[in-house]
Amino acid sequence: MILRKLEIGAGFLTFGQIVQAIVAFGANLVLVRHLLPEEFGRFALILSSITIVFSFITLNVKTLILRTTKNTFGQDKKSIYFSIISYETIFGCVIATIWLLNFDTIGAWELSLIFILAVRHWLNANLGFYEREMPFKNIAVIETSGVIFGHLVTVLLVLKGYSKDLLYMREAIITGVMIAMFGLTGGVRFFRMVSPWKVQWKNIFFEVKPLWLDTFLENSFNRIVIVLIAFYGGERLAGFFFQAQRLAALPLQCLTPLVSRVAAVWFGATEERTLRKEGRNRLLLFLAMPLGLLGIMCFYLSENLVPWLFGYDWAKSGHFLSLMFGVVVFSSLFEVLKSYCWQSRQMRWLLVSRITQYFGMGLSLAFFYVGIFNVGEAFCIGQSLAFCASFLSLLIILERVERNW
């Protein structure tokens, strides 16, 4: 019964994610012809800075919500988790505001992005209560509707000649639609707030420490790269890189419902270790060939395809994308292993692979400082190497550890 429910949910979520990716891609084709690379670079820098803050302060309570057994998930525990989500969101807003005020020429929309991302952070964590019921069809419909509406409004505004702060407005519209629709359909859950003095923070920190570290390392990786490129190459170069990074992430964006949400629920619900391992390997084999083909196409076709789609002013993004073929191939495969490690409580090996991923960032800086590549090329190649090395190292470790299962 659970497996059948997951199969149906995976279909709805994957289809919805593909629709979102197509709509976002189409809207982006319009935006890149009306906005400058510097505007995308500035937005990416602000977005990355805020995301790093929220990645640092979040305790990843959603994972605890999803993996807590039904018998132990009473009202008291729900109230504690709900309170932690609320407290960390408020704390994140304060820290992000202090951080952004150190930037030059920070305007109202840049500061408003803090509130927008805070609401999205709170909503995403809160949906853990709803996702325990596996209502994947409703989730897919609401999330897809919010993304479609936000991108359509953005396109209409830019076609009417309005371009100032449009990227920030898009995020506000998408977030507003989603929280309104989830609220109206019962997806947002509220529980009694617990005083921060009554929360057993020591026990919570002990339980989430590996999850927190992995989430911080994961969410910060791409964001730190954006910040470094903006620092060394300026906001214009960051804009080119940001577009290439978004295109390289399209396969993962489409497959996230399968490799993250649905896979995580299935791994968590499957108690038999051998069966869980077999399911993991089957999913990896199922994805490996199409992702490999996409990676080859990315390497050989991007430099011609991206300028044709975006305009020749964005030719540098095409060059960057061709160097990110490793991201196209290995990011989704790594996500499968990440979901597996989270639910099978093998976080130490996941953290080892994360460290390997950050070595790729170190190689990027080394390539740049030695003068082998310019800063953009260095970080693109570094990202490909990082995702390849992190996936292969984690897979090898898991195979050795689980050899006698």
Image (tube, helix red, strand yellow):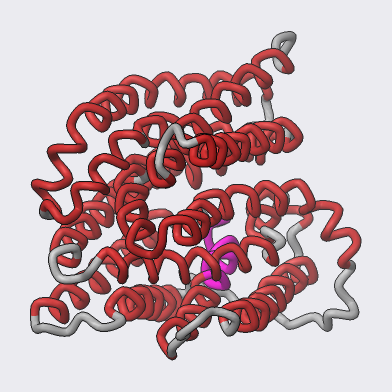
Up the image or down, 331 lies above or below 159; here it is above
What residue is at 42 percent from the left and 56 percent from the top? 233
Left/right placement of residue 121 relative to residue 351 reads left
- The residue lying toward the viewer, choosing from 167 and 236, is 236
Q: How many marks?
A: 0
Residue 129: in magenta span: yes
Q: Can you give x and y, in whole percent of width and height, for residue 389 in the image?
A: 55, 26
What residue is at 36 percent from the left and 48 percent from the top? 245
Q: Can you give x and y, in whole percent of width and height, for residue 123 in the image?
A: 52, 71
Up the image or down, 294 lies above or below 57; here it is above
- The residue lying toward the viewer, choosing from 296 and 63, is 296
- The residue lying toward the viewer, choosing from 369 and 164, is 369
Q: Can you give x and y, in whole percent of width and height, for residue 278 in the image?
A: 55, 19
Q: Can you give x and y, in whole percent of width and height, for residue 228 in the image?
A: 52, 55
What residue is at 55 percent from the left and 76 percent from the top? 118
What residue is at 30 percent from the left and 54 percent from the top? 240
Left/right placement of residue 229 relative to residue 212 reads left
- The residue lying toward the viewer, choosing from 264 and 370, is 370
**Which secondary structure dominates the residues rendered in magenta?**
helix
Left/right placement of residue 314 relative to residue 341 reads left
Occupied quadrant, residue 140: bottom left
Q: Which residues, given as a range, are shown in magenta?
A: 121-133
Up the image or down, 104 lies above or below 227; here it is below
Quarter of the image that includes the C terminus: top right
Q: Residue furthest bottom?
A: 108
Residue 182: in magenta span: no
Q: Residue furthest top?
A: 404
